[in-house]
Amino acid sequence: MVSNTSIEPLENDQLIFQKTAPAELTVVLPTYNESENVPLVVELLDKALAGVVWEVIVVDDNSPDGTSQVTADIAQNDPRVRIIQRIGRRGLSGACIEGMLASSARYVAVMDADLQHDESLLPKMLDALRSQHYDICVASRHVEGGDVGTGLSSVRAWGSNLANNLARKFLKVELSDPMSGFFMLRRDKFVELAPNLSSQGFKIMLDIVASGKGALRIKELPFVFRERQHGESKLDTLVTMDYLGLLVSKVFNDVISVRFLMYSMVGGTGVVVHLIALKFLLILFALPFGVAQLFATFVAMTSNFFLNNRLTYRDRRLKGAAWIRGLFTFYVICSFGILANVGVAELIYTNKPVWWFAGAAGAIMGAVWNYVVSNALTWRKG
Ligand code: GDD
Ligand code: MN
């Protein structure tokens, strides 16, 4: 809806035509429902970055709480503040990438907009980069002097530890806090790596460092992760799967997309759901096998749809009527997927009767079909 409130014309003497010094540092703040926090963060940045020419770019995914408007209001009185309002898109990594690409400063930083990251670290990060000895500076919650504080629940802390160990083992990334979302780097280095980054997920810093393949000179600085004061965390436990997706995709050198990997992992859970449902239907309702198998297939498809909608396509999540429409297209697509699977397997088997080869080829064919078609139809863009 377009609002009718008229806008007061600016008086001439209110307009100051002045060329300001270009920013040396851009701070990118990704936001989703942070309207209460953004004004506080800007105030804190102003204090912490005294003596630095800086700007802030808030990248807001059209938050229902009006974060974009709140930011635009601040920007009316403060030209250091800019807003990128994204419509029809969701996702932390993508938001950070867009914000950094909108900068033309020498250095760019990414920081949470919820006051959990300690802004007083920014001048120290900037000094480290200005020394020319480092390309990226990461704020770490685990190096000596640092602390996870009380900002992270114990389950999250455990998951976080596990993720750190996996990153070290598989990506050969030597970071004490690879999950950190608080960092600063040279913009030229970022622009170089940007085409290789995944806009899916939330591990943007890890993605940057892993994509650098050991070439980035890293400085780590400790800080205490503060507790959230306003609003709530958007990262639920399901994002762990998203993290595993990034890990596997990087191990395979980006040949397989993170989205396809997530889709396949969901498919894997579908097999388990199917077998449990089948057993349940056979025992509890004593259904004939064919009927039980049919019902189990529907249970598994529904659970796959639900998980894909929550996870693989969290940035295009379907709701309400679109959810129901999506579910039905998904049933239809998967049914054809089964035909593709069986057809291909049979074709191969008649030419080369090796059961596991024909079986696997059919299953892969079915999975690729389901992915490509549901990507285009069920969760189509915009
Ligand atoms: N634009 C945009 N789009 N911003 C988002 C989205 C999104 O889909 N999801 C979250 N954000 C913003 C939040 O508004 C906040 O400013 C910041 O990203 C971090 O989100 P939180 O929801 O507060 O994350 P957290 O505190 O649970 O997680 C923190 O710790 C993780 C490690 O455990 C973050 O720093 C993560 O980056 C970090 O990996
Ligand atoms: Mn947070």
Image (cartoon, rainbow, N blue to C red):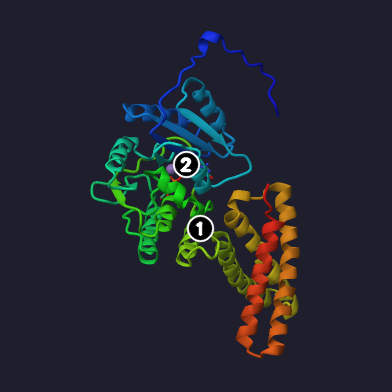
Q: Nearer the viewer, residue 381 or 14?
A: 14
Q: Position of residue 367 (x, y in %)?
A: 64, 69
Q: Nearer the viewer, residue 284 or 190?
A: 190
Q: Position of residue 46 (x, y in %)?
A: 37, 27
Q: Position of residue 219 (x, y in %)?
A: 29, 49
How many neighbours does mark 2 have within 10 angstroms: few (below 14), some (14-19), or many (20 or more)? many
Q: Nearer the viewer, mark 1 or mark 2?
A: 2
Q: Amino acid at mark 2?
A: Met
Q: Residue 281 is drawn in which quadrant?
A: bottom right
Q: How many marks?
A: 2
Residue displayed at 40% across by 40% down: 109
Mark 2 or mark 1, which is nearer the start of the sequence?
2
Q: Is residue 132 left or right of residue 60?
A: left
Q: Is the N terminus in the top left, top right, bottom left or bottom right quadrant?
A: top right
Q: Is residue 141 visible?
A: yes
Q: Which residue is mark 1?
A: 242
- Callout 1 secondary element: helix
Q: Which residue is mark 2?
A: 100
Q: Is residue 286 visible?
A: no
Q: Nearer the viewer, residue 305 or 136?
A: 136
Q: Residue furthest bottom?
A: 353
Q: Is residue 156 left or right of residue 131?
A: right
- Callout 2 secondary element: helix
Q: Position of residue 171 (x, y in %)?
A: 39, 63
- Report how far apart the C-alphas of labels 1 and 2 lie in the structure: 22 Å
